Amino acid sequence: MVFRHLLQMVRSYSFRKLREKGGGRFLPALTFLMLAPAFCVTQQTALDLDGNSVNPLKSNAGQLVVLVFVRGDCPISGRYAPTIQRISEEHQKDARFYLVFPDKSESPSDIRKYLRDFRYSIPGLRDPEHALVKQAHAQVTPEAAVFDAKGALVYHGRIDNLYEAYGRARSASTTHELEDAIQAALAGGAPSNKEVAGVGCYISDLR
Amino acid sequence: MKRPFSLAGIGFILAIALALRPGTGVHAQAAPDRKDDKQVTFTRDIAPVVFQSCARCHRPGESGPFPLLTYDDVKKHARQIEIVTRTRFMPPWLPELQALKFADEPRLLDEQIATIRKWVEEGAPEGNPSDLPSPPKSVEGWQLGQPDLVLKAATPYLLPASGSDLYWNFIFPVPIDRTRWVRAVEIRPGDKRFVHHANILVDRLQNSRQREKEPGAGFEGMEIKIESETFDPDSHFLFWKPGTVPYLEPEGMALRLDKGTDLVLNIHLQPSGKPETIQPTIGLYFTDQPATKFPMLLQLQNDTKLDIPAGEKNFVVSDELTLPIDVDLLAVYPHAHYLGKDLQATATLPGGSTNTLIHIPQWDLNWQAVYRYAQPIFLPKGTTVSMRYVYDNSTENALNPNHPPERVRGGNRSKDEMAHLWLQMLPRNFDPKAGDPRMQLQEALSRHDIRNNPADFEAYYNLASMLQARGNVAHAIAEYQAALRIRPHDATANNALGAALIASGQPDRARAYLQAAAQTSPEYFDAHYNLGNALASAGDFPGAAEQFAAAVRIKPDDADAHANLGSALAELGRFAEAKAQFERALGINPAHALAQENLQQLQSAMGNH
């Protein structure tokens, strides 16, 4: 089990390195990985709540993938729970939703409790090393990223415009960027906005 | 006599001062050992600011959504902290800096904000652990110690997971067997993270209970109205918002609570994303010192002028009141709903000079508060207090509850608007022998309300009762009649007019009004009692006995009604029944003079038979 995941990560890691920096980097990267494989696993992948590394973008079975980044200590994340859960239910058949927790200090049991308290039925993932944060270009929590069936990022940013600024919430949102992006991706097109900044807690403040 | 005083309980929501306000004119005490080229560190530079200005709320059990007690806590929200302090969204404080100072302003100095910014730009370093000041001390539980009386909401309120803001009212009966004086009230609104503000109204007649589906259930509503029976104006702001430290009333200004009084807690809640249970408690701290100073809450308002067209960005409502007596202004509470944008109040002194009492350049219902002045503001007789509120009913106002915007008028629902300015005033330099000086304030206020809205029934009614209380019965009768032209069937006004006519020696004219009152409200004790008196003055003792009998049926413990029933029965020669009524009156009040006298007379009359 562990071995299989490790292999998968080695491939994805080396491949990225190769693409980013051009040829000639393959060997040092591999050497590094071989020297510290366990360290590399926790550093470079998201984890499920049992500690297994997972890559939601690879196991999507040809479906859309929606990542929603949240933090337990971010009140705006909490307030969005019913909206996120509703959107995930409405797209149960066409998209896989994951709630991604980028704060490494949030333990699996903290997250399980959070999912219970907020009545989530979508899976939670830990992203302690921000592998998914980087892939989704996530800036704040809560924020969503929509990947198409081929794994390409088609939208990232706010869920809707409920918050105009900190503490300045509308009685109801009047734009629905996440739902629009899902619809567009399902229709095989691109959403009118590829990214819209959200209001929330900065992920870059996390250590 | 029952007098409806319009006391809107004030409820509510959301937002921010985005405007950068440079140059507050206040200067930080420069840290002596800090040079500009030195790196800003958490332990030396940031922790003292955060501990002093943020940690009161940002700690477990308080209203802040996350704690700010350690480097890790603060680092995890560093950029957010930089933004919310720079925009002055935090610490929450709406008024602009002004000459008349408020107590406990949590405003950060410009220098402190700049330091936070520099720290975040430099990567938010921790610094030397030995520089760290000791974390702020926090008092667990009741902030003023164990209260003399703790009231707990009978039924918790279940806050739904989602939706917009909610307003709920809890009724707390106060189990006291005599009048008590309250020097402080501590409101513990339940889980403070979900409560935006809370306000207690004193309900001396248990009026609000009628709004509960069952006793103790509570009821929904943003604004509530409470009647009072005698001239007993609201006098104290009993207000909670995040970060509130319980307020000890000044010497001599304790709040009176009588047996049978209810406290109504009006609470503004915001859903958190998951269901929450809210069960507030109230702690009362008593004193043996009865009040010697009697402030009054006055309300400037011009809700009838609130008719804001859809899309209107700058709709102005203003109001003013010229003070008939000298007062000290102790506190202000501006109130508008979601469309309110710029709220300002000024005082123009008789000499013509003006003072800003408060100016909120970006109103935010979420952070509404009672603002107490650091020192009482003396406003001499002849001062004009005015308010000017600006409303934004366009799509540019993110808090606009209507999308697209709709025409909005004044009203009690959160979708309606309000233009209220509450002022806590303490009369000064008055002659105590000339009666309660607050009556002059109330009279001026009622005349002002009538000018603003000639269809304001309550204003005529309150004016009439003020005139009557001050001995001006003839004018009171005219104002009651004006009130009745607006609401001809109002039982309270019909009864009051009848009572005023009796008092002015016109019981014959009184009868029709009292009959109307008793007809509209068959369970109205006062109407039956007064009608009994009017009939008795005209020699109609059978009619009088019938009315007094109705009165004692409604209030079996009223000694006056029993004594009067006894008198009417005695006039009719029904001595045995009369005797029983006098004895009943004396059973309730052994010192009842009329019952004693009449019983004696009756016994001698019965002896003669």
Image (cartoon, grey):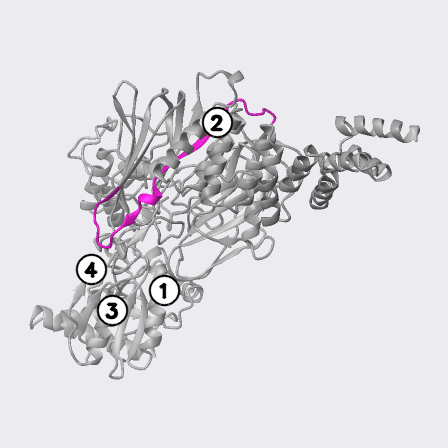
Q: Write down the region rendered in magenta.
A: B288-316
Report in which chain the residue with disc 3 lies: A
Query: What residue does disc 2 label?
Result: B439
Tags 3 and 4 touching, CB below 8 Å: no
Q: Are marks 2 and 1 on the same chain?
A: no
Tags 4 and 1 touching, CB below 8 Å: no
Indicate the amino acid at tag 2. Met
- Cα–Cα span, label 4 and label 1: 19 Å
Query: What residue does disc 4 label?
Result: A197
Query: What residue does disc 3 label?
Result: A178
Q: Secondary structure at mark 1?
A: helix
Disc on the earlier residue, 1 or 3: 1
Q: What's the mark number on residue A81?
A: 1
Q: Secondary structure at mark 3?
A: helix
Q: Secondary structure at mark 2?
A: helix
Q: Per the image, is B311 magenta?
A: yes
Few, some or many residues within 10 Å of mark 3 (<14, 14–19, 20+): many
